[in-house]
Amino acid sequence: MFLGTHTPKLDEKGRIILPAKFRDELASGLVLARGQERCIYVFSATGFAEQVEKIRQAPLTSKLARDYVRIFLSGASDERPDKQHRVTIPPALRDYAGLDRDLTVIGAGDRAEIWSTEAWNAYYAEKEEAFSNTEEEVIPGLF
């Protein structure tokens, strides 16, 4: 499970050092994909296979489903960390998420997310108060 907030740097070759807490789960391979809110989703190889299986359940006759699958899978990239636990983020994904040197990596349960620190701070500032003031069931069965 991916938890916490981490602030690694992107090096000049477009690589990120994986947070230590995530290394075991991602050591055998990972998949980077376009995430919503212009971040990058990071799945373990197994976690990505589970997502693809869920996607396969979408009806081929649904235009929204076809559009989602095309955008999500066309940008996906399978990667393997090197011996220093670095992973290269492909240029297209770096551009998509607006990544520069300062990054924020968050754990989001079944995946990690890579954000530009500036984008994460803006998102967090906008959403934190709404989170604190949640009065109704947002996720069924949670409260």
Image: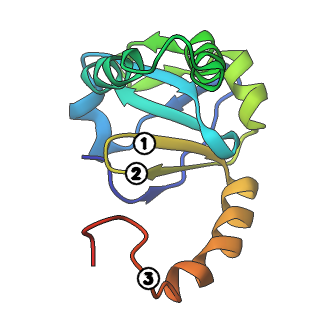
The quadrant in which the C terminus is found is: bottom left
Q: Residue at x 73, y 17 (%)?
A: 92
Which of marks 1 and 3 precedes in the sequence? 1
Q: Type of residue at label 2?
A: Ala
The percent position of residue 28, horizontal first and vertical second, equals: 24, 16
Q: Type of residue at label 3?
A: Glu
The percent position of residue 74, horizontal first and vertical second, equals: 62, 10
Crowd tier of the residue under label 2, counting other residues whose Cα lies within 10 Å: few below 14, some 14–19, many 20 or above: some
Q: Is residue 21 above or below residue 66?
A: below
Disc 3 to disc 2, C-alpha distance: 21 Å
Looking at the image, do the residues carrying marks 2 and 1 touch, with CB atoms under 8 Å apart?
yes
The percent position of residue 86, horizontal first and vertical second, equals: 45, 25
Q: Is residue 78 above or below residue 25?
A: above
SS at badge 3:
loop
Mark 3 or 1, which is nearer the eye? Answer: 3
The percent position of residue 11, horizontal first and vertical second, equals: 65, 30
Mark 3 or 2, which is nearer the eye? Answer: 3
Q: Type of residue at label 1?
A: Ala
Q: Which residue is mark 1?
A: 112
Q: Which residue is mark 3?
A: 136
Q: Residue at x 50, y 23 (%)?
A: 32
Q: Is residue 46 left or right of residue 72?
A: left
Crowd tier of the residue under label 3, counting other residues whose Cα lies within 10 Å: few below 14, some 14–19, many 20 or above: few
Q: Nearer the viewer, residue 72 or 44?
A: 72
Q: Which mark is residue 108?
A: 2
- When asked about the image quadrant of residue 128, the answer is bottom right
Looking at the image, do the residues carrying marks 3 and 2 touch, with CB atoms under 8 Å apart?
no
How many marks the image carries: the answer is 3
Q: Residue at x 32, y 16 (%)?
A: 29
- When asked about the image quadrant of residue 79, the answer is top left
